[in-house]
Every structure is written in structure tokens, then in C-alpha cells.
Amino acid sequence: MKNRLRVLRAELGWSQADLAERLDVSRQSVNAIETGKYDPSLPLAFRIARLFERPIEAIFEDESDSSS
């Protein structure tokens, strides 16, 4: 799953540790999500969307949809 997490985080000047603290997850989890090694759970995806005040679809994109 592709995502815009790194871009959104950078726009706010937050480090991975800053974002991890706000989401109550580890910095390693943030890194894994940003690099596409880990897809967040649905509850975590909702927390991310609320934190950035955007719909989930504006942050996460199913890679199979991008080829259409």
C-alpha cells in the first residue's frame, strides 16, 4: 500500500519520533509504514487520518488501484 505519510509528516516538520509519540506507536512502526513494509491496522489508519485532518484515501492508496 502506498502512502503519503512521509510527505505529510515533513510538511509539519515532525520527525518519525514526533509522529510515533502522537500516534502512540514506536518510531520503528512509523518507519515501516512510511517505507511500505507494514500496512497499518484500520484503527491506526483512522488515527493517522484524524491527526492529519484528511480522509484515509488522501493518505493511503491501494497499489492495485494506481495502475488504472
Image (cartoon, grey):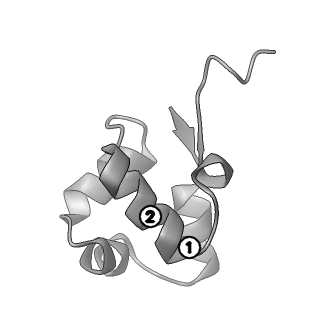
How many numbered marks appear? 2
Crowding at label 1, few (<14), some or many (≥20) Cα neighbours within 10 Å? some
Residue at image position (76%, 16%) is 67
Q: Position of residue 27 (x, y in %)?
A: 24, 65
Residue 31 shows which numbered tag?
Answer: none
Residue 15 sits above or below residue 57 on the image:
below
Residue at image position (50%, 71%) is 50
Q: Position of residue 45 (x, y in %)?
A: 41, 53
Residue 14 sits above or below residue 64 on the image:
below
Q: Amino acid at mark 2?
A: Ile
- Residue to which mark 2 is pinned: 48
Quarter of the image for residue 62 reads top right
Give how far apart the Cα atoms at labels 2 and 1 are: 6 Å
Q: Is residue 28 left or right of residue 15?
A: left
Residue 52 shows which numbered tag?
Answer: 1
Q: Position of residue 49 (x, y in %)?
A: 52, 63
**Disc 2 + disc 1, Cβ < 8 Å:** yes
Q: Amino acid at mark 1?
A: Phe
Residue at image position (18%, 64%) is 26
Q: Secondary structure at mark 2?
A: helix
Q: Is residue 67 left or right of residue 38?
A: right
Crowding at label 2, few (<14), some or many (≥20) Cα neighbours within 10 Å? many
Q: Secondary structure at mark 1?
A: helix
Residue at image position (39%, 65%) is 47
Residue 66 sits above or below residue 8 on the image:
above
Q: Is residue 25 left or right of residue 12?
A: left
Residue 12 sits above or below residue 9 on the image:
below
Q: For the C terminus, which image quadrant? A: top right
